[in-house]
Amino acid sequence: MAPKLPAYLYPTESSPGLRVRGGTQYTSSQGDYVCGGCGAEDHANGDNAVKALVDDYTDNHGPAHRNGGNR
């Protein structure tokens, strides 16, 4: 069983951002985000779902809010 990540590596309202963990032979990839601009948050498991989560975060949340809107 893979060890649990320390709490400080997960995004929170006070420390927003994106976290992605690649899968292994025994575990699936995982991702989480909390947006510092609008407070949205999401979680995903599996390669396709994590890729969609990263695309959503990049297009609509973290970087989009820092740049003043969507790309």
Image (spheres, rainbow, N blue to C red):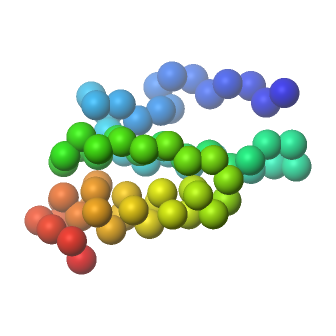
Give the percent coordinates (x, y) of residue 15: 32, 33
Quadrant of the drawing holding the C terminus: bottom left
Picture mark count:
0
The residue at the far bottom in this view is 71
- Most foreground residue, 64 or 49: 49
In the drawing, does residue 20 fall left or right of residue 41?
A: right
The residue at the far right in this view is 25
In the drawing, does residue 64 fall left or right of residue 22?
A: left
Query: At 47% across and 25% down in the image, what residue appears?
Result: 8
Quadrant of the drawing holding the N terminus: top right
- Asked which quadrant contains residue 36, the reply is top left
Query: At 50% across and 43% down in the image, what residue appears?
Result: 43
In the drawing, does residue 64 fall left or right of residue 55?
A: left
In the image, residue 57 sits, relative to residue 40, either above or below, namely below
Give the percent coordinates (x, y) of residue 17: 37, 45
- Asked which quadrant contains residue 16, the reply is top left
Give the percent coordinates (x, y) of residue 52: 51, 63
Query: At 21% across and 71% down in the image, what residue appears?
Result: 70
In the image, residue 35 sits, relative to residue 3, either above or below, namely below
Query: At 18% across and 58% down in the image, what residue appears?
Result: 65
Give the percent coordinates (x, y) of residue 68: 11, 65
